[in-house]
Image: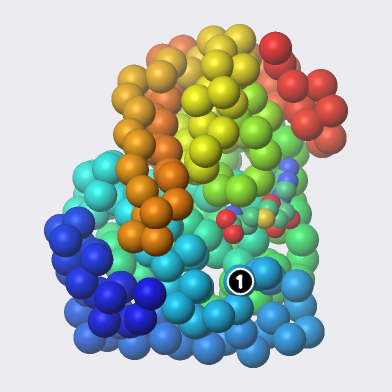
Amino acid sequence: MTIDEFILALKNASISLTEKQVQQFEQYFNLLIKTNEHVNLTAITDKQEVYLKHFYDSLILAHYVKPLQNESKTLIDIGTGAGFPSLPLKIAFPQLKIVMVDALQKRVNFLKEVVELLDLSNVDIVHGRAEDIGQNNSYREQFDFATARAVARTSVLAEYTLPFVKLGGEFLVMKGAAAEQELADSKKALATLGGSLVKSFDFKLPNGDQRYIQIVSKVTHTPKKYPRQAGTPSKKPIQ
Ligand code: SAH
């Protein structure tokens, strides 16, 4: 989508961007493409595709989860990579307090550069694995929301994200066509980790791609043994 189409599609979802925010997205795009020449950040480099598949796809989460738009909620983004979905959300909704986690130092370095360039505050960038950070009491059960996009199947993601969510908070699942199957396969993981599905939305991106957003509420504490040791959740998902 062109920038004008981006602005219009967001407006149709009741999300409006100021001129400054539109400019911040341009700056983010330019640094992403420039850095991607020597650091592997994204397979999508065409400008219209980045605006649709990274920026719009990230922001549309806030259309379904309204408190992201105007409440000072805390959000942790596991396996954020080049910053998706949390950085577009932070640009559009600056009152959010976000923590971005990634296991790759080079991606973390890029994120620090973007955050500085855009002059964003209340952003914490953490280098490490979800399995290790999830056992750290400064992060464990501290967040209103945890999310992750394109990191693992839902049963594995539940173990990466739910330990961070406070009681009453939510794990926001962002998925494509496999969403319903992955959710069915994660029944035991959600129950074990303290999650319960409350809502599910399905919709299409403007290009017709199928998307799902599933909202899992944190209803009981995550047992201390989760997340298990780094690597175990993906090798032996709870099921
Ligand atoms: N969320 C981004 C990136 C997806 S690629 C997007 O939607 O575009 C997956 C990212 O997750 C990679 O950057 C990888 O380093 C990170 N990752 C995978 N497993 C992880 C784990 N257990 N803990 C932290 N980061 C992880």
Q: Is residue 92 above or below residue 21?
A: above
Horizontally, residue 75 falls left or right of residue 192, namely left
Q: Position of residue 9 (x, y in %)?
A: 24, 66
| Position of residue 220 in the picture relative to residue 226 (left or right) | left
Q: Position of residue 57 (x, y in %)?
A: 42, 58
- Counting from the top left corner in percent of width and height, residue 73 is at 32, 47
- Is residue 221 visible in the rendered image? The answer is no
* Residue 110 seen from this side: yes
Kindly identify the residue that appears in the image at 48 percent across and 18 percent down: 195
Q: Nearer the viewer, residue 173 or 93?
A: 173
Q: Secondary structure at mark 1?
A: loop
Q: Nearer the viewer, residue 101 or 237?
A: 237
Disc 1, ligand 1: is the CB inside 8 Å?
no
Classify the position of the N terminus by image quarter: bottom left
What quarter of the picture does the C terminus occupy?
Answer: top right
The reply, left or right, for residue 142 in relation to residue 9 is right
Q: In the visual, does 203 lie left or right of 236?
A: left
- Colour scheme: rainbow
Question: Callout 1: few (<14), some (14-19), or many (20+) C-alpha neighbours within 10 Å?
Answer: some
Query: Residue at 43% across / 44% down in the picture?
Result: 211
* Residue under numbered circle 1: 44
Name the residue located 52 percent from the left edge and 38 percent from the top edge.
Answer: 177
User: Quadrant of the rendered structure where residue 185 is?
Assistant: top right
Which residue is drawn at the image coordinates 60% and 19% (left, top)?
186
Q: Is residue 147 above or below residue 39?
A: above
- Number of numbered discs: 1
Using the image, determine if residue 58 lies above or below residue 118.
above
Amino acid type of the residue tagged 1 in the rendering: Ile
**In the figure, residue 156 lies in which quadrant?**
top right
Residue 120 in the image: x percent, y percent? 41, 74
